[in-house]
Image (cartoon, rainbow, N blue to C red):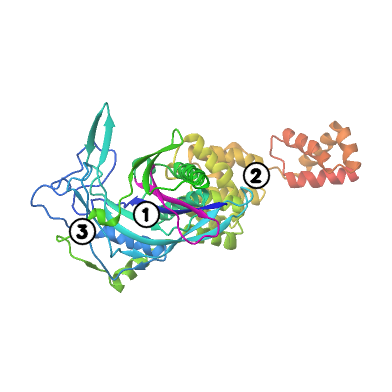
Amino acid sequence: MPYEPVIGLEVHVQVKTRSKMFTRAAAGYGEPPNTLTDPVVLALPGVLPVMNKAALDRVIKVGLMLGCEIAPVCKWDRKNYFYPDSPKNYQISQYDQPICTGGAVEIELPGPARNLLGEHRRIPLTRIHLEEDVGKLNHAGGESLVDYNRAGTPLMEIVSEPALHSAEEAFAFLTALRLIMIYGGVSDCDMEKGQMRCDANVSVRPVGGQKLGTKVELKNLNSISFVRAGIAHEIKRQTAIVEAGGAMVQETRDYDGQTGTSQSLRSKEMAHDYRYFPDPDLMPVKVDAAWKAGIRAELPELPFDKQRRFFAEYQLPYTITSVLLPDRGLCDFFEEAAKLSGRPQAVGNWIANDLLRELGGARIALAACQVRPAHLAGLVKLVETGVISGNLAKEVFVGMFQSGEAPESIVARQGLRQTTDAGELDQWCAEAIAANPKSVADFKGGKENAINAMKGFVMKQSKGKANPKLVDEILRRKIAG
């Protein structure tokens, strides 16, 4: 009997704020251990929490971007558990009245080829709620040390419906969600820094069945690639067990991305194990229409909406939009250069092929690059108007990248303007024909590409300054002569 996987994801995203969720202690990463703390973070006697409104604003923003229903009233609950990473022995979270319910994440599954648009699907969400992060345990030399720098950081939990059916879909979901968070300025989602973490609930059932199988929770999936690999491993493991007549046990398993194996950690907790109850120190929060309207006015264009607009407005191919889309700053750079030049396809090609190559080689970010949209627009215009050739433009671009000098200045200073003088071009073309008799014969015999050898001769003689279009016309006229 064939089986199909059913997958739901629980994604924790640290919300980018200056201070922590219930105190003014600074939020951050990379500081010396236990320096981003205060009496509230350390749960000293007598301290009281105060809500960080900026964190709630950002979660409402995410809810609006994903089409969620924003609760008119949400409240705070205590999730009780005893573990060294939680100083209070409880976590302030949201249980039965989360801030966001419903909504969906649009994903793109790979197409039949890398340069073709894939299938788009909307993966429904169950809820999004806001809570505080816990500290981090560091294990070394048989000892465990706890760092509370992360404790109390605003943490958003995004829970999907069990609506994913492959490891590739889970990978696409996280990729799309991460991009939405970055576009919205909600989080940097750097998994190496713990800013985005994912647990996966995986089960299998007979194909076509409606009842969910016994789920297993996978933890320690600390990269998007490990999420994909871990889920694929778990699907294979569960399928082998049920096909052999075995029964699944609801549990939490630890996935090791280095070895590609998993091991049981514990039986899965249920909600009642945490003894949730309303936090007596925090009042419920009422979110009115004016609050939501103010945030809605700041919503960014979503990534796939931007891609669809680039298709329609600029006629960009998928190969270019898929390069631009992951970087909102690069998209803005493209649009500014496209509007200045009036040649969006040419600008897109320069960015995808030349700008990104130089940025990668220099290992710098776009923000530190000396090439600005006006520079690129100017270079495109120089090529389009025939001032310089495409080959010379590549040299100008490198110079522009290294110095930040305007392309027009580089062309003038180095004397790179294309030659359109009819006398000079006529002489170079005559020399090219005389020097390439075989190419002339081949061209007359119907081999169209044979003319390229003569063009190359002219370009060499002119040091790249001959106008290619005029050279082609003169050569054809002389050969036909």
Pick whichever of labels 3 and 1 is earlier in the sequence. 3
Q: Is 215 on the left-hand or right-hand side of 88? A: right
Residue 148 location (% of width, % of height) = 22, 42
Q: CA distance from mark 1 to mark 2?
A: 41 Å
Q: Which residues are magenta?
A: 195-221
Check if mark 1's residue and mark 2's residue have beta carbons within 8 Å.
no
The amino acid sitting under disc 2 is: Ile
Indicate whether residue 209 is drawn in magenta.
yes
Look at the image and tell me whether residue 441 can be seen: yes
Quadrant placement of the C terminus = top right
**408 in relation to 271, above or below:** above
Pick whichever of labels 2 and 3 is earlier in the sequence. 3
Give the numbered dot on residue 388: 2
Q: Quadrant of residue 315?
A: bottom right
Give the number of the mark in front: 2 or 3. Answer: 3
Q: Answer few, some or many: residues within 10 Å of disc 2's Cα (few below 14, many 20 plus, some between 14 and 19).
A: many
Look at the image and tell me whether residue 412 can be seen: no
Q: Answer few, some or many: residues within 10 Å of disc 1's Cα (few below 14, many 20 plus, some between 14 and 19).
A: some
Indicate whether residue 118 is drawn in magenta.
no
Q: Is 334 on the left-hand or right-hand side of 288? A: right
Residue 325 location (% of width, % of height) = 51, 52
Give the numbered dot on residue 51: 3
Find numbered disc 2 in the image and state the secondary structure of the residue it sits on: loop
Q: Main secondary structure of the magenta part?
A: strand
Point 39% across, 41% down: residue: 222
Residue 248 location (% of width, % of height) = 43, 48
432 or 31: which is nearer to us? 31
Residue 113 location (% of width, % of height) = 64, 48
Q: CA distance from mark 3 to mark 1?
A: 20 Å
Find numbered disc 1 in the image and state the secondary structure of the residue it sits on: loop
Q: Which residue is mark 1?
A: 185
